Image (tube, rainbow, N blue to C red):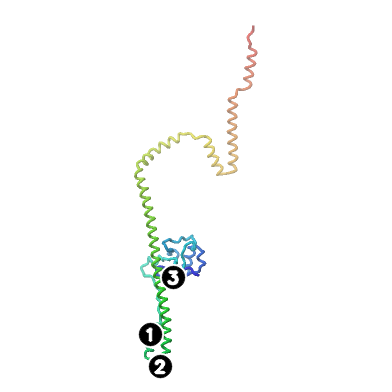
């Protein structure tokens, strides 16, 4: 089993070990760079349907990589450069040899040895024709995959265009709402200074300020924060105690007034 990657630019199939199927797409790109000298920043990997392969996902998470449904590779460097992509040429040298042997066989006399020689030549011609047929079938298959690859990238382009159109519609609606509410926003901004001055005159409760001060102290130093909280609570309890004692009448003055009332009784 192999992992199949089809390079769409020149229409050739690249094969890798199946161990890369459980690796990430980024590691597959590094393997392509190491084996076929295509830089990772110039590689675009797309699966059938137009989905672009994410670098952090695993290769096996995509339903692609087989011989009939390979991963499509686009080399951006080939697309951006002016030169045509290099396509490997395949030649069969045995064709010219067979042509010469056929001409020699026609000049041979009509004997049994000629029949045997022509039979062997026919078998060799059949083998060559079989190789040519398989080569043509592979060319047709590569052409079909090349068509699928360009169809996949066109589907990806359509998806990108559709998503940008949706974003454009949202932006257009948001900008229209902004234009309609522009005057109201300006009025609110002009009244902002008055609102800030009014809020500045509103006193804050002591409990809120104490709570915020306590949180800031706890964030800065947790242990001293607890001590400061204790001192604050002690101070508040002491102030409450002092207020209660101030409101309470003194005992000496009360006893003095009672004794004075007892001594100042009217005489009969």
- How far apart in space, not on screen, are marks 1 and 3 (Cα)? 32 Å
Whichever of labels 1 and 3 marks the residue nearer the N terminus, that label is 3
Which mark's residue is nearer the viewer, 1 or 3?
1
Please tell me which residue is depicted at 39% across the width and 92% down the height of the picture: 110
Measured as percent of width and height from the top left, residue 223 is found at: 60, 43
Measured as percent of width and height from the top left, residue 41 is found at: 44, 63
Residue 174 or residue 198, whichever sits in front: 174
Measured as percent of width and height from the top left, residue 12 is found at: 42, 71
Q: How many marks?
A: 3
Q: Residues within 10 Å of mark 2 (few under 14, many from 20)?
A: few
* Secondary element type, mark 1: helix
Residue placed under numbered mark 3 in the picture: 13
Please tell me which residue is depicted at 36% across the width and 68% down the height of the picture: 82
- How far apart in space, not on screen, are marks 1 and 2 (Cα)? 21 Å
Residue placed under numbered mark 2 in the picture: 111
Please tell me which residue is depicted at 43% across the width and 35% down the height of the picture: 198
| Left or right: where 66 falls relative to 96 | right
* Secondary element type, mark 3: strand
- How far apart in space, not on screen, are marks 3 and 2 (Cα)? 49 Å
Measured as percent of width and height from the top left, residue 205 is found at: 51, 34
- Any mark on residue 99, and which? 1
């Amino acid at each position: 089993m192999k992992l199949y990657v089809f390079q769409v630019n020149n229409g050739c199939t690249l094969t890798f070990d199946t161990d890369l199927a459980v690796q990430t797409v980024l590691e597959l790109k590094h393997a392509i760079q190491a084996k076929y000298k295509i830089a990772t920043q110039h590689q675009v990997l797309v699966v059938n349907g137009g989905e672009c392969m994410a670098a952090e996902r695993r290769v096996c998470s995509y339903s692609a990589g087989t011989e009939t449904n390979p991963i499509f590779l686009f080399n951006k460097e080939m697309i951006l450069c002016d030169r045509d992509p290099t396509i490997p040429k395949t030649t069969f040298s045995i064709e010219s040899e067979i042509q010469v042997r056929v001409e020699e066989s026609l000049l041979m006399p009509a004997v049994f040895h000629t029949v045997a020689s022509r039979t062997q030549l026919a078998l060799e011609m059949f083998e060559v024709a079989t190789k040519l047929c398989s080569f043509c079938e592979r060319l047709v298959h590569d052409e079909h995959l090349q068509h699928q690859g360009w169809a996949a990238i066109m589907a990806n382009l359509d998806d990108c265009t559709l998503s940008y159109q949706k974003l454009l519609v949202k932006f257009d609606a948001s900008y229209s709402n902004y234009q309609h509410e522009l005057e109201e926003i300006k009025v609110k901004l002009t009244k902002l200074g008055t609102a800030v001055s009014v809020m500045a005159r509103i006193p804050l409760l002591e409990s809120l300020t104490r709570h915020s001060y306590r949180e800031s102290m706890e964030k800065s130093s947790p242990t001293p924060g607890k001590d400061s909280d204790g001192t604050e609570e002690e101070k508040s309890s002491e102030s409450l105690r002092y207020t209660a004692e101030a409101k309470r009448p003194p005992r000496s003055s009360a006893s003095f007034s009672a004794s004075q009332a007892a001594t100042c009784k009217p005489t009969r």
